[in-house]
Structure formats: C-alpha cells, structure tokens
Amino acid sequence: MKININGLSVNIFGKPENKPIVFIHGFPFDHTMWQNQINVLSDEYYCLAYDVRGLGESYVGDGQYTMEFYVDDLFSIIKELKLQKPTLCGLSMGGYIALRAIEREQEAFSALILCDTKSEADDNVGKLKRSENINIINTEGIKKFVDVFVPNCFADETIEEQKDLFNSILTKCYKQNPIGVKGAIIAIMSRTDTTAFLPQIKIPTLILCGSFDKLTPPQVMRTMSEKIPNSEFAIIPQAGHMSPIENPNAVNDLIKGFLKRKL
C-alpha cells in the first residue's frame, strides 16, 4: 500500500499489529533499494519504506533542504501512522537521518540498524567534493553526475557480475529530479556531527558494512560500532556501499537474527 504523508510517498508492507520497522534509503536512491529486505521481513514485521523528500515520488519543492527537515519528515510519518517505538534501519544518508533522529528522541525507538554509513559530518575536503557534484549537475546534467557518483557505491565485482541489477539502479537514478538531488547534497554537506552522541545510544544497535565499501570502509564503521555500547558489527562479503542490494541474503540473515534476539 502506498500513501502520501505531508508530500512524502510512504510504502507500507505487512500487518500494522506487528512490530514496525522504518527503512530510510541512501542517496541518490529511493525506497525500492530495500525491496529484498521487505520481501523477507514483511510477514513478521510492519515494514515502512518512504522516499526522502526530493527523491523518488516524494515532493521536491524548492530544493532548500537540511538534515533537520529530513528528520522532521521521519517524525511526521511516525506520528501520522501512530507507530509505537519503531526500529530504524538506514543506509548512508538514511543512516545520517536515523542517527540524528535517535539523538533528538532516542526513547521513541526500540532498535537501530545502520548500514554503510558514518556519524562524522563532512570535513572540508568532503564539502568541496559535494560542491563539485552540484556543479556537475548544473553544468552537465543529472546523468553525468549519476555516472560519476553511483559506480563508487558498488563493489567492482557487483558492476561486472550483476550488470542488469547495476544498470537498473542507474536508470532509476537518471530519473531523479535534479533539484531534489541537489537539495539532498546540501542537506548532507551541512549535517551536524553525531559522533559525540554515540556512547549515549542505549537501544540495541546493529551495524553492517560491505567488505568493499569505498565510501564508509569497514574500519570506519567498526570504529563507530566500538563507540556504541553493546552494538553488534558485521561485514557483508561481496558488497560495496550498497550491501542490502549487492548481497541481500547476508544482510537479511543478520537483520532477522538481530530483530529476533533484541525485540
């Protein structure tokens, strides 16, 4: 079922009486990146996957976004659907949103799953790279940006051995609204750093990282995990930054086991 909440396209799977999980996608993708996980989990859990504002089928507006707006959007979904202490599962940008939401109101959630993400804000080098990406979109178009950015999100072997999958992701990204994509870049590059809050996270936390992740490598995520009390950390083999897509079976097994133990 798909519904609209404050301009956000929210996709709902499973029975509302089950424990809720909210999936937050990465940049510059949409909610469909979680389909493999939803297929496995929706029999036992109430799964919600939405398109972050500016991406997928959610509203675009003027493209002037901040991370706080993204977190406000998440809380608006939780409030509208009256979700009782959902588990948050976010990848990359979705992880930034999840971490900031936990920092703002940890007691509203029962568990946290972070995939291929980090708590640190962009340093100066990162901000300059984001600015360059906005310029690429302005001068050469969304397709050029996608062709430059998205391959780095995948392991080389995924691109070579799962060509149809990779090309289908590219095609979806080509269709994103340039204003929304640039707005997401602005939100990401201006986000706050949540590292200092990590030791205060008390809810069960699972951290997953693709073995070939070039953007948030395993050592970066292992270090983050070590700062979160009692968190669990696992490396996903044969995967880059998009581990839930590249190796869904491994990710699904780890998430299912975590949820059964902790919820």
Image (cartoon, rainbow, N blue to C red):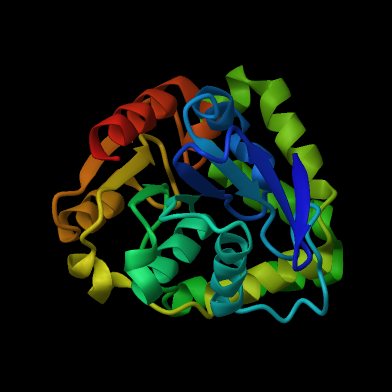
At horizontal 40% and vertical 36% (from top left) the residue drawn is 212
Q: Residue furthest front?
A: 17
Q: Is residue 245 visible?
A: yes
Is residue 85 found left or right of 149 in the rendered image? left
- The residue positioned 61% from the left and 77% from the top of the image is 69
Q: How many marks?
A: 0
Instruction: Reply above or below: 28 against 155.
Output: below
What is the quadrant of residue 81 in the picture?
bottom right
Assign the C terminus to one quadrant of the image: top left
Quadrant assignment for the N terminus: top right
Residue visible at 19% across and 58% down?
A: 228
Q: Answer above or below: position of 29 versus 242.
A: below
The residue located at (55%, 75%) in the rendering is 67
Residue 240 place in picture, x, y as percent: 46, 37
Q: Name the one closer to the observer, 143 or 23.
A: 23
Relative horizontal placement of residue 254, taking residue 28 as reference (left or right)? left
Image x and y of residue 102, in percent: 37, 66
Q: Is residue 135 above or below residue 151?
A: below
